[in-house]
Amino acid sequence: MAPDTPNPSPEVLSLEQPVPPAKVSLLSATKAFATYKGIVEALQPVTMEVREGEFLVLVGPSGCGKSTLLNLIAGFEFPTGGMVLVDGKTVSGPGFDRMVMFQEHALFPWLNVIDNVIFGLKRKKRLSSSDRREVARYYLNLVHLGKFETAYIHELSGGMKQRVALARALAPNPRILLMDEPFGGLDALTRERLYGQAQEIFARTRKTIVFVTHNVREAACLGDRVLIFTSRPGRIKREITINLPRPRGFYDPNVSRFAGQILAELKTELAEEEGVESHESSSHGHPVLPVADYFLADGI
Ligand SMILES: Nc1ncnc2c1ncn2[C@@H]1O[C@H](COP(=O)(O)OP(=O)(O)O)[C@@H](O)[C@H]1O
Ligand SMILES: [Mg+2]
């Protein structure tokens, strides 16, 4: 609860009891785009399930269809074949139950911080304007930006902008959060600082999350499960369950071990794509990689 809201409205009180998280299913979902050069097959049949309250991470080579898959769940795109379901119902378009956060914060520079968050609540017709402000304040406090509500976007650092974007995505209290490389544009130090906060926020809000990243350590640090995709047209190549307790330290040796496994899969995929064999492997079948190598996948 925001410390400066002594008489919270029922809407704000209800934020303390999050709505039940949703389940997402893809059943042999495919996506092809018609372009002037011909048909671009973005996704091969993908069958997967995101469990209620799960943090699922998607990794894969650039252009393998990760954003396309998020867009199918968001309802911005529709599958060419197969089905995309939320709670057993076919996704028929965007909705407040699913919010998307992109690499670019997409905040409005002409609005201050709190008005950017309030903007995300515009379609919540039953909220009065003071309720909207109260809800926005609640989420700004959650992302530790309560003191910056009247600041303008250009006055904020990159990490702060992404936290405003997160507050804006959380404010309508969606059941599903779709995050497309949300920390990808930030420098390494800012990102590392955000992981702790992000884990705390996700634990408190208990959303069902589908998160795309290029960073294998980020995948291992945040995910309950990681799906590794092949090159385009993307299909699921491997699934890795990260059964580590939370909160997880970014440089925890167990996180490093899982990051190494994910990177090994990605490297094999890229090697197969280029027709080269991958030779790095330890006696356990997983490659032994220096720390710096984990970030190689940043540029894939
Ligand atoms: N609207 C579109 N029209 C045509 N081709 C598209 C469109 N969106 C994506 N693609 C193509 O589909 C493939 C997958 O893209 P995308 O999902 O953005 O990959 P990723 O997010 O994994 O990098 C790419 O080859 C991309 O060029
Ligand atoms: Mg993408």
Image (cartoon, helix red, strand yellow):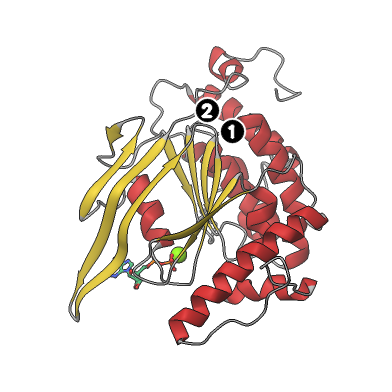
Is residue 162 visible in this depiction of the protein? Answer: yes
Q: Residue at x 48, y 35 (%)?
A: 51
The kind of secondary structure element at disc 2 is: helix
Q: Give the SS element for disc 1.
A: helix
Pick the front one: 73 or 102:
73
Residue 3, horizontal then vertical, whole percent: 76, 23
Asked if the residues shown at circle 1 and circle 2 are in contact, with their CB atoms under 8 angstroms apart, the answer is yes
Q: Which quadrant of the figure has residue 113?
A: top right
Q: Please, what is the three-letter code of the amino acid marked with disc 2?
A: Arg
Tag 2 residue: 132
Q: Is residue 140 visible?
A: no
Q: Amino acid at mark 1?
A: Ala
In the image, the residue with mark 1 has its CB under 8 Å from the nearest atom of ligand 2: no
In terms of depth relative to the viewer, which is nearer, 285 or 85? 285
Farthest residue, direction front: 283
- Which of the pair 138/31 is nearer the observer? 31
Dot 1 corresponds to which residue?
A: 136
Residue 165 is situated, as x and y percent measured from the top left of the image, at: 57, 48
The residues bearing labels 1 and 2 have C-alpha atoms spaced at a distance of: 6 Å
The reply, left or right, for residue 228 in relation to residue 298 is left
Number of residues whose C-alpha sits closer than 10 Å to that of mark 2, classed few (under 14), some (14–19) or many (20 or more)? many
